[in-house]
Amino acid sequence: MKVLHISTYDRGGAFQSAYRLHQGLLQLGIESRFLVLYKFTNKQDCTAYLESIPISQRIFESLKTRFFNYYFSKKFGKKAFTFVARSPYSLHKHELVISSDIINLHWVVKFLDIPTFFKSLNKPIFWTLHDLSPISDGFHYEDDIAEINNKVFKYNHQVKLRHLANCTNLTLICPSRWIMDKTESSTFCKEHKKFHLPYGLDFKLFKPQDTAKVRTQLGLSINSIVLLFIADNIQDKRKGLCYLMEALPLLKVKNIELISVGGGKVEFGDGIKHKHLGFVSDPEYLSKIYSVANIFVIPSIEDNLPNTMLESLACGTPVVGFKIGGIAETIINGENGYLAEEITLEALANSINLAIKNSAKFERNKIRNKAQNEFELFIQARKYKKHYYESLKLNVSE
């Protein structure tokens, strides 16, 4: 059985989740491949779409892309390419797509042309929902709505209603129950098969580290309360760093040190000890950072099943966040963190204060073991394998 994973980029949270699944399937002996539109890393097992097609076709695709961008920017505005349900690329004609038994789509904005792709393929197609884009009229998260021209919604709705609603070979994979509930209200996805399959994580890579040693390495006080915030782009308002910044003065203890990780910069006020480590991708170094923290704070105002939350739990570090999405499904008050009931800085500060007050009650090994029982990569890969085989009407033991 040949499985092909498709993603626009080979970086970012959605890709990371997809690539981990790819690695898990390889460990099970599945012939798993990966195709991306834009390649930024040196991962040898990821094929770059434009680099893997003949030069003549590459030139044609380039010209088509320019026309596509010009047409839709004129029609809907400059940001249309990020949200529109069309793409200039002939993905369905790629050799890897043609030769695969199973197609697993991931975050494919700008890459997937919905009409030509679904019309051309009869083989089983799985679509892992990393955000709301596949099942919405164009937005990735509901907070995007204000930034999008309403004409885009109408156009996408027509395209998806025509080409997705009656697609019989499509199965939706929902990492969180939150996004699975969203599929029930989607005009295009009510009738499709759908399964709740959480992300997986390699717990050999993410594990607790020697806290005292790492604190010394990072120049942190042994006795301080270390809060950690991580995001691909720390300036992304959906990730909620502004809530954490404004909640810090409301904390009852004063020996707080904040570590932030991710792209972008942010200025904190006087009196706040803050160390920004920039973008970090190395799992071993990330494990050290998670381990050194007393609390991982994830103040996202809208999210699916964040990788950072799973990584923190794998390292035994309790999590504090708002009661939204997959965070609300995973965090249990007093057991592996605390949930803020309302999306306010006061509620966030209260939950952080509770986590600090009861920090001695958190048992890192229990936090890790609970997470491992739910999110171990091997568990996820086996479930995907089962559904892949069933779609091909094969016995899983074959």
Image (cartoon, rainbow, N blue to C red):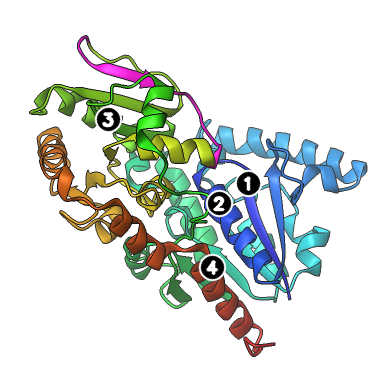
Task: Tally the numbered discs.
Answer: 4
Look at 26% across and 37% down and name the residue there: 294
Foreground mark, 3 or 1, reads 3
Look at 35% across and 49% down and name the residue there: 303
For residue 208: magenta? no
Residue type at mark 1?
Thr
SS type, badge 2: loop
SS type, badge 1: strand
Sequence order check: which comes first, mark 2 or mark 3?
A: 2
Residue 226's disc number: 3
Q: Does 11 sit left or right of 351 as displayed?
A: right
Q: Quadrant of residue 288?
A: top left
- Residue at label 4? 378
- Residue at label 1? 8
Residue type at mark 2?
Trp
Look at 53% across and 30% down and name the residue there: 78
For residue 271: magenta? yes
Q: Nearer the viewer, residue 176 or 189?
A: 176
Residue type at mark 3?
Val
The answer to whether 71 is drawn above or below residue 358 in the figure is: above
Residue 107's disc number: 2
Q: Kindly check if marks 2 and 1 are in contact, taking CB atoms under 8 A apart as contact.
A: yes
The alpha-carbon separation of the residues under discs 2 and 3 comes to 33 Å
User: Which residue extends farthest top?
Assistant: 270
Sequence order check: which comes first, mark 3 or mark 1?
A: 1
Sequence order check: which comes first, mark 3 or mark 4?
A: 3
Q: Position of residue 146 (x, y in %)?
A: 33, 37
Foreground mark, 4 or 1, reads 4
Residue type at mark 4?
Phe
